[in-house]
C-alpha cells in the first residue's frame, strides 16, 4: 500500500504528520478557525469535489447500446439480412418489407429496454447521492454541516464520536479521539489519536496525528485540518474503489436470471422441434423457417425480465424515499416484505425526542417544573407553590455544564444543537438563570455502555455567586489546590454507584443505604410516570488528568431530573398495523425499565414480563431464545444485549428488522436482516452499517417501508407472471399450430411457402405491445388494500411459486386451445391463411390486455386503479387497430377483419376469459385445500 501523501506524489515532499500543527496550517494557508465561505468555494473550484471517482458510472449511450448486445438479437438481424439477400438470387423476391419491419420493431423494443434501464440507473444514482454523508466544518468561524463532497483542503473539520472522517486531515486538537481504520489499514483495533508530530518515516497505520477518509471516529472528539480530498487521499491512492456499489444482484434478480436461462433452454428445444416438423412436413422455405424460429426465440425468451425487476425495485425505493425511508441496498426492498419482527429503540423512534424536564429531586424535596417544550420561562414549584430556583442550583448547574448541547446561532435560542436529553437539561437550567459558562478541560464521553458522562471544568466560575457552590460545601475542598470540578450525569443507578457522599441542605454527608434506597425509589416513581430520569453528581478535583476510573469515583450525589418525552402521535396506530401484518414489535431501550414500561403501555406494547439488560445477561442462549418469544419490552439494555436479543430471535427463525443509532449499535444493525439507522440521531458509523436509513427517525416510517416492500414484491410477481404466461402462450400456439396444421390441412400447409400460424412480424409485434407499455405501467401499480393484513412472506418463498407455475401452464394451454380453435375455424371457413393469421394475431393481443387484469384481480385491484396501465392498454389496443385498419396493413400482411370476423374473435375471447377464470378459481381451491 502506498503511504505517500498527496503532495509527495506531486513532487514537493510534505510529511504532514511530521510537522507541528502551525506549520501545517501555514502550508495550507488555513487557520484553526476554518476557512471563509468564499475561500472554500474557490478551493472547491480548484480542487474539485471530495469524492472517489467511480468506475461504474455508465453513460446513457452505453445503456442504449447494451440493449442490443444479445445473441438472439444478432441472430435475428442476421436472419433479416439473409431474407434480404435472398432477393439477390435469380427468381426469388427479397423480403424487404419483413426485414425492415423486423428491424423497426427490434429498435422499438430496444427503446423500451433503454427507458427501463435508464430510469433504474437514474434512481439508483439519486439514492446513492442521498445517502452520501455530511461533514461538520468550521466556515466563517462557525460550525456548519455540509455535504462531505464539498470539503476542501484547508477546511477545519469537527469530528465527534460516530462521525465518518470526510477527508484526509491533520489533527489540530483532540479529546479522547479513537478511530476505526480497518477499512483503510485492515487493522481492526481502534487507534488512539493525539495531535503531536510523529517521525517522518512513521507508517500510515501509526500516524496518530492524522485521520483518513473512509475511517470513523468511534470515540471522543477532535478538530482537524484537511490536507487532501477526493482522489488526493490515501483511499483515492489505492485505486480500488472502497465504496464500490455493494449492490450485486438481489436474490430476486438472481432467481429471475436463473429462470430466464432455463426458459431459454426449454424454448430453444421446442423451437428445434417446430423447425424439424416444418422442414419435414411442410413446404415452407428454409429462410421463413429460420426467421420464425429465431423470432420465436426472441419473443419467448424473457430477456427483458431482469431489467424490469431492477426497475421495479429502483422505482420502489424511490417511493420509499418520499416516505422518508432511504434504502441503501436494493435487496432490502425484498427483505422488507419478509420481516416478521421489529426490534426497535424507544427514544426518538417511538417517542418524539422532544424532551422537557418536568420534575427535579434535590435534597429532601421533589419539585415540579412548568413551561412546555424549549420555552425557557417556567417556574419550579414545591407542593404547587413557586420556589426560588436558586435553591436548586447545584443539580441544575451540573446539568448545564456536563452537557454538549448548545443554542443554535441566529435562532434567538429557539433551537438547539445536540442530544435532546442534554437540550432539556440546558433548558431547565436556563429556567433558573443558570448558564453554561465554565472552562472545560476534559470530557469522559457518554456511551450507551457506560450510561454516564463526566466533564472537568475550571472551578473559578462556580466560586462566584451562590453560597452552595462546590467551594462552600465540599468538606474536602482545600486551600485552593482543587482548582477543578468534575460533573457527572447519567442513569441514576450508575451515578449512585460512583458516589459515596450526598448533598443535603447545602451540607455534604456520607451516602447511606437509606439515601440510596430513597433515590432509587424516586427514580422509579418518576419513571413510572413515563419520565426519563437522569442522576447528577460532582466533586472537587486536583488532578484533572487522573485516570478515568479514579476521576469518576468518590462523587457527591446531587439529585435527579425527570424529563418527559411524549410518544409520537402516529406510533400506536403503526404498532397496531404491524401486528395486523403478522409482525411482532419488540422494544429494546437503554432507558429505565419503568419508563420503558410506561411509554410501552402508551403505544400498545404489553409491558408485563419486561426484562432488563442485566437480566438478559444472566440467561443462557437457550433461555433467552424462549424469553424473546414472550417479552415485548427490554429496558436498560446496552448494545451488546441488543445483539444477543437479535441473535436469539434469528435463532428462532425470525427475520428481524433492527434499529440503532450509536456507534455500538453498528454490529447489530449490520447483522439484522434489515438494519435500520436513524437519519437524524444516527451516527455515520451506524448509517454505513445499515441497509436502510429512517430520515425522520420515526417508527411509523418502518411500517410504511414494509408496506412498500410488500407492494413491490407483488408488482414483481404480477409482472413475472404476466410475461411468462404470455411467452408460454405464444410458443405453444406456434408449436401446436404447426403440428396440428400439418396434420389437418396438409394441402394448405404443405403447399404454402409461408405456412405459419403467426408470421415473425406478428410475433415481434405481440412481444412489443405486451413487454412495452403495459409492462412499464405494471411497475407503478398501487399496493393492494389488504397489504398489511396478510402474514409476511416466508423466507424461502420464491418469486415464482407453485401457484404461479400452475397458472402459467394452464393459461398457456387455454390460450393455445382458444387461439388455435379460432385459427382453424377461420381457415376452414375462409380457406385463407392470411385471414386466419390476422384473427389469431388480434385475439392474442386482446387476450394479453385482459390477462393483466386477471392477474391484478387477485390483488383486489380494480381495472381502473392504475391510470398508467389504463393508458397503456388503450394505447396497445389502438395500435393494434391501426395495424389492421390503416395502410400499415400492407406491411404486416394482414387483412382488415370484417364484422363477422370480429364475432369469431369475440367468441374465442369470451371462451378464453371464461376458461381462464374457471381454472384460476380451480387452481386456487386446489392449492388452498
Ligand atoms: P435510549 O436512547 O434507548 O433511551 P441510551 O443507551 O441512549 O438509551 O441511554 C441509556 C441511559 O443513559 C438513559 O436512560 C439515561 O439515563 C442515560 N443517558 C442518556 N443520554 C445521556 C447523556 N447524554 N449523558 C449522560 N447520560 C445519558
Ligand atoms: Mg440514546
Image (cartoon, grey):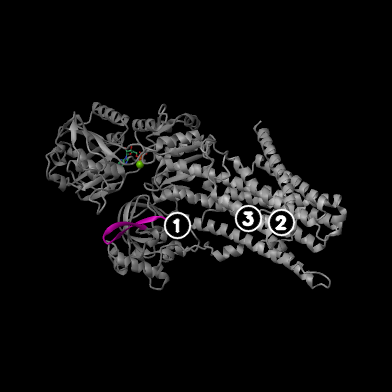
Q: Earlier in the sequence, mark 2 or mark 3?
A: 2
Q: Name, please, the residue furthest toward the front.
A: 899
Q: Earlier in the sequence, mark 2 or mark 1?
A: 1
Of badges 2 and 1, nearer the viewer stands 2
Q: Secondary structure at mark 3?
A: helix
174 relative to 58 in the view: left or right: left
Q: Nearer the viewer, residue 926 or 403?
A: 926
Q: Are marks 3 and 1 in contact (CB under 8 Å)?
A: no
Q: Earlier in the sequence, mark 3 or mark 1?
A: 1
For label 3, the crowd category at 10 Å Cα-Cα, with few meaning under 14, some 14 to 19 and many 20 or more, is few
Q: Secondary structure at mark 2?
A: helix
Look at mark 2 in the image and give the residue it sits on: 763
Q: Are marks 2 and 1 in contact (CB under 8 Å)?
A: no
Q: Residue at x 31, y 45 (%)?
A: 419
Look at mark 3 in the image and give the residue it sits on: 878
Q: How far apart are the two marked residues, 2 and 3, measured between alpha carbons?
A: 18 Å
Segment tinted magenta in the rendering: 132-146
In this orientation, does residue 661 appear? yes
Q: Nearer the viewer, residue 548 or 357?
A: 357
Q: What is the magenta segment's predominant secondary structure?
A: strand
Q: Would you say residue 12 sits in the magenta stretch?
A: no
Q: Are marks 2 and 3 in contact (CB under 8 Å)?
A: no
Look at mark 1 in the image and give the residue it sits on: 129
Q: Nearer the viewer, residue 447 or 358?
A: 358
Q: How far apart are the two marked residues, 3 and 1, measured between alpha carbons?
A: 41 Å
541 relative to 746 in the view: left or right: left
Q: How far apart are the two marked residues, 2 and 1, measured between alpha carbons?
A: 42 Å
Q: Would you say residue 136 sits in the magenta stretch?
A: yes
Q: Name, please, the residue furthest toward the right.
A: 747
Q: Nearer the viewer, residue 96 or 828?
A: 828
For label 1, the crowd category at 10 Å Cα-Cα, with few meaning under 14, some 14 to 19 and many 20 or more, is few
Amino acid at each position: 500500500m502506498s503511504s505517500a501523501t498527496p503532495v509527495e506524489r506531486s513532487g514537493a515532499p510534505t510529511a504532514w504528520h511530521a510537522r507541528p500543527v502551525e506549520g501545517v496550517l501555514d502550508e495550507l494557508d488555513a487557520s484553526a478557525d476554518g476557512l471563509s465561505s468564499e475561500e472554500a468555494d474557490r478551493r472547491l473550484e480548484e480542487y474539485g469535489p471530495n469524492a472517489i471517482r467511480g468506475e461504474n458510472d455508465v453513460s446513457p449511450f452505453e445503456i442504449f447500446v447494451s440493449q442490443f448486445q444479445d445473441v438472439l438479437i444478432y441472430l435475428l438481424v442476421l436472419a433479416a439480412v439473409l431474407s434480404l439477400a435472398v432477393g439477390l438470387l435469380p427468381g426469388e423476391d427479397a423480403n424487404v418489407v419483413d426485414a425492415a419491419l423486423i428491424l423497426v420493431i427490434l429498435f422499438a423494443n430496444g427503446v423500451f429496454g433503454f427507458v427501463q434501464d435508464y430510469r433504474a440507473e437514474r434512481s439508483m444514482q439519486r439514492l446513492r447521492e442521498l445517502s452520501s454523508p455530511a461533514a461538520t466544518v468550521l466556515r466563517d468561524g462557525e460550525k456548519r454541516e455540509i455535504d462531505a463532497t464539498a470539503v476542501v483542503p484547508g477546511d477545519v473539520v469537527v469530528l465527534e464520536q460516530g462521525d465518518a472522517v470526510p477527508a484526509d486531515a491533520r489533527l489540530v486538537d483532540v479529546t479522547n479521539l479513537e478511530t476505526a481504520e480497518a477499512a483503510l489499514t485492515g487493522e481492526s483495533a481502534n487507534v488512539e489519536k493525539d495531535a503531536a508530530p510523529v517521525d517522518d518515516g512513521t507508517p500510515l497505520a501509526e500516524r496518530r496525528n492524522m485521520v483518513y477518509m473512509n475511517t470513523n471516529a468511534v470515540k471522543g472528539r477532535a478538530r482537524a485540518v484537511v490536507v487532501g480530498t477526493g482522489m488526493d487521499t490515501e483511499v483515492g491512492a489505492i485505486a480500488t474503489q472502497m465504496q464500490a456499489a455493494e449492490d450485486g444482484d438481489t436474490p430476486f434478480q438472481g432467481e429471475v436470471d436463473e429462470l430466464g436461462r432455463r426458459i431459454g433452454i426449454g424454448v430453444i428445444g421446442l423451437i428445434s422441434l417446430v423447425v424439424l416438423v416444418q422442414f419435414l412436413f411442410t413446404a415452407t422455405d428454409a429462410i421463413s423457417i429460420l426467421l420464425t424460429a429465431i423470432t420465436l426465440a426472441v419473443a419467448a425468451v424473457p430477456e427483458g425480465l431482469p431489467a424490469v425487476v431492477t426497475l421495479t425495485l429502483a422505482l420502489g425505493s424511490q417511493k420509499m424515499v418520499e416516505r422518508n425511508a432511504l434504502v441503501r441496498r436494493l435487496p432490502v426492498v425484498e427483505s422488507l416484505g419478509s420481516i416478521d419482527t421489529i426490534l426497535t429503540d424507544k427514544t426518538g423512534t417511538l417517542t418524539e425526542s422532544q424532551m422537557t424536564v418536568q420534575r427535579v429531586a434535590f435534597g429532601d424535596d421533589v419539585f415540579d417544573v412548568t413551561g412546555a417544550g424549549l420555552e425557557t420561562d417556567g417556574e419550579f414549584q414545591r407542593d404547587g407553590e413557586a420556589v426560588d430556583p436558586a435553591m436548586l442550583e447545584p443539580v441544575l448547574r451540573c446539568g448545564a455544564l456536563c452537557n454538549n448541547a448548545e443554542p443554535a446561532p441566529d435562532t434567538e435560542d429557539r433551537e438547539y444543537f445536540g442530544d435532546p436529553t442534554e437540550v432539556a437539561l440546558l433548558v431547565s437550567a436556563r429556567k433558573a438563570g443558570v448558564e453554561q459558562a465554565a472552562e472545560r478541560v476534559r470530557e469522559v464521553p457518554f456511551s450507551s455502555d457506560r450510561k454516564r458522562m463526566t466533564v472537568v471544568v475550571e472551578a473559578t466560575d462556580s466560586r462566584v455567586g451562590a453560597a452552595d457552590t462546590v467551594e462552600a460545601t465540599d468538606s474536602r475542598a482545600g486551600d485552593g489546590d482543587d482548582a477543578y470540578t468534575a460533573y457527572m450525569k447519567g442513569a441514576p443507578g450508575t451515578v449512585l454507584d460512583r458516589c459515596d457522599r450526598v448533598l443535603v441542605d447545602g451540607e455534604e454527608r456520607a451516602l447511606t443505604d437509606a439515601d440510596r434506597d430513597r433515590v432509587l425509589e424516586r427514580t422509579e416513581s418518576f419513571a413510572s410516570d413515563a419520565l426519563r430520569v437522569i442522576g447528577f453528581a460532582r466533586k472537587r478535583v486536583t488532578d484533572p488528568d487522573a485516570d478515568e476510573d479514579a476521576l469518576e469515583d468518590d462523587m457527591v450525589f446531587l439529585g435527579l431530573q425527570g424529563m418527559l418525552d411524549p410518544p409520537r402521535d402516529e406510533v400506536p396506530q403503526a404498532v397496531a398495523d404491524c401486528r395486523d401484518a403478522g409482525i411482532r414489535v419488540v422494544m429494546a431501550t437503554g432507558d429505565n425499565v419503568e419508563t420503558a414500561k410506561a411509554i410501552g403501555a402508551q403505544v400498545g406494547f404489553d409491558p408485563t414480563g419486561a426484562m432488563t439488560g442485566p437480566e438478559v445477561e444472566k440467561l443462557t442462549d437457550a433461555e433467552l431464545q424462549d424469553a424473546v418469544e414472550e417479552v415485548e419490552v427490554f429496558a436498560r439494555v446496552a448494545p451488546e444485549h441488543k445483539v444477543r436479543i437479535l441473535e436469539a430471535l434469528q435463532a428462532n427463525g425470525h427475520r428481524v428488522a433492527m434499529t440503532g443509532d450509536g456507534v455500538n449499535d453498528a454490529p447489530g444493525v449490520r447483522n439484522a436482516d434489515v438494519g435500520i439507522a436513524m437519519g437524524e440521531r444516527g451516527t455515520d458509523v451506524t448509517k454505513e452499517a445499515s441497509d436502510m436509513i429512517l430520515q425522520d427517525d420515526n417508527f411509523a416510517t418502518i411500517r410504511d417501508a414494509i408496506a412498500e416492500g410488500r407492494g413491490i414484491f407483488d408488482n414483481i410477481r404480477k409482472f413475472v407472471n404476466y410475461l411468462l404466461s404470455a411467452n408460454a402462450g405464444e410458443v405453444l400456439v406456434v408449436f401446436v399450430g404447426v403440428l396440428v396444421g400439418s396434420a389437418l390441412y396438409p394441402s394448405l400447409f404443405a403447399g404454402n411457402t409461408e405456412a405459419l400460424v403467426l408470421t415473425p412480424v406478428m410475433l415481434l409485434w405481440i412481444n412489443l405491445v405486451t413487454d412495452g407499455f403495459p409492462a412499464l405501467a405494471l411497475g407503478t401499480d398501487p399496493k393492494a388494500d389488504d397489504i398489511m393484513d396478510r402474514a409476511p412472506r416466508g423466507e424461502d418463498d420464491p418469486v415464482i411459486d407453485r401457484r404461479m407455475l400452475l397458472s402459467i401452464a394452464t393459461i398457456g394451454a387455454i390460450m393455445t386451445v382458444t387461439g388455435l380453435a379460432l385459427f382453424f375455424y377461420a381457415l376452414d371457413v375462409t380457406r385463407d391463411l392470411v385471414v386466419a393469421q390476422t384473427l389469431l394475431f388480434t385475439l392474442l393481443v386482446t387476450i394479453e390486455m385482459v390477462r393483466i387484469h386477471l392477474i391484478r384481480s387477485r390483488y383486489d385491484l380494480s381495472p381502473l386503479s392504475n391510470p398508467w396501465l389504463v393508458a397503456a392498454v388503450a394505447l396497445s389496443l389502438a395500435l393494434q387497430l391501426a395495424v389492421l385498419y390503416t395502410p400499415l396493413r400492407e406491411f404486416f400482411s394482414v387483412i382488415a377483419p370484417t364484422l363477422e370476423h370480429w364475432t369469431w374473435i369475440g367468441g374465442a375471447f369470451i371462451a378464453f376469459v371464461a376458461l381462464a377464470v374457471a381454472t384460476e378459481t380451480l387452481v386456487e381451491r386446489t392449492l388452498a385445500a
